[in-house]
Amino acid sequence: MKNINRALVILLITGLNLNADNLLDIYNEALINDPTYKAAEFSYLADKEIVVQGRSALLPSLTLSGSTNWNEYYQNKELQQEYNSFSTSARLSQPLLRLDTWFSYKQSKSLTNAAEADFAFEQQNLLVRTAELYFGVLRAIDNLNAAVSEEKAIKKQLDQAKQRFEVGLSAITGVQEAQLAYDLSKASRINLEGRLYSSREALNALIGREIFSLDELGNSLLIETPNPTSKEEWVKLALSNNYQLKAALLRKDAARNNAKSSASNHLPKIDIVGTKSESETNQFNYEGININGQGIPVPELTGRRNFAIQFSVPIFQGGAVNSQRKQAYSQYERVNENTLFTQRRIIQEVRSEFSNVITLVANVTAQKQAVLSATSALEATQVGYKVGTRNVVDLLQAEKNLYSAEKNLANAKYDYILANLRLALSSGTITPGDLVKINNLLK
């Protein structure tokens, strides 16, 4: 009885509607607190800088430098002269012809766009992960509720069987069978309590705080086939919208440009370079003029300006250029095969999820009918038990069938909701609006 009371306390806590969190509440907190999502966000922000770094190699480069020196001139270990000297210089360079750098820049653009696609997928995936964890808790609560109700009903039948045995209306076998059913239901309830704790902790880990109460699914869920109704139409949507496939195609384009950049390393490189330098030295003094025995320095300023077009061609680098080209093209072929694998995987996922939704539509309908049938069967068995045409085993089985049907119906509804979200994720069409629609079904 203590375990049953503890389970009822759990149900009371989780069933409170006061200040209960709904699906959108959890999702909004996950946007701020989910470590997986935040890591993906910072990864995207880091990869955004790739294109900036790639573009910088095509833009002018300006370098300034300067120095100041103190000079002492000795002769026969005697100081003859000491003076300051200063120098400044500036160097400006602009690439004119660098195909390797140009292809590297195109590679960086593709990599940055791929990072953006990766982050877009993580944004969509967070919608599905939140729903999976949220309904995972509701599923565990419903299953535990069914187990507790089943345990209570079987306990009631066990007590009645004992009373009937004590007054000689039934055999001891009826008591033993009822006791077995009760022990099994108790073990099942304990197992489901553990699953509920695990589901709640998984949801807590998503947002970083304790969840005490959740809005539950109402009765207004509309079961309908996916739209569009054609599996191949969903495949077309996925090929156009799936962000994982977009990222793979962009990385394929980046690998192609990397190969072109490596192949361009043997081509001429032309830069325009301008330099300007100035120096000042106080080495010499005015002749015959001094103050307190110290000469007055004569500043000497010199300057130079240089403008050049620099041309370079790598003739032989020990085979490194040719080897890098071969390596880059092999890497491109590897990425090409990975992209093909991603495309086929996504097509398979879309087709599988579409078939799963179709199956679950029929399953929910069948489970609804199963609940009605199990209810009618239980009522008939109860009547037969009272008049003696059915025994306790029949009654226990009828009760188990009803609770099992109710549990299966709840699970089928959750599976249907999640399957639709996974289908939308695979096709790349899922949006926060889908979560809003589901949230409106909660109560």
Image (cartoon, helix red, strand yellow):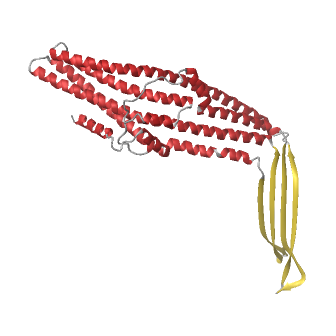
Q: Is residue 427 left or right of residue 86?
A: left
Q: Quadrant of the C terminus?
A: top left
Residue at the top extreme, as displayed: 389
For the point 38% across and 44% down, the residue is 210
Most extreme residue toward the bottom is 292
Q: Write the residue at 26% across / 36% down.
A: 8
Looking at the picture, does residue 142 appear above or below residue 55?
above
* 381 sits to left or right of 165: right
Residue 391 in view, yes or no: no
Height in image: 89 above or below 421? below
Q: Quadrant of residue 282?
A: bottom right
Residue 215 in picture, x, y percent from top left = 37, 38
166, above or below 131, in the image: above
Query: Would you say 211 lies left or right of 87 here?
Result: left
Most foreground residue, 407 or 288:
407
Rendered location of residue 95, percent (x, y): 81, 47
Between 53 and 126, the residue placed more toward the observer is: 126
Q: Horizontal placement of 173 versus 248: left or right? A: left
Residue 221 location, x and y as percent? 41, 29
Q: Residue furthest left?
A: 167
Q: Quadrant of residue 191?
A: top left
Rendered-image quadrant of the N terminus: top left
Q: How far from the left and from the top, in percent, is residue 67?
A: 77, 66
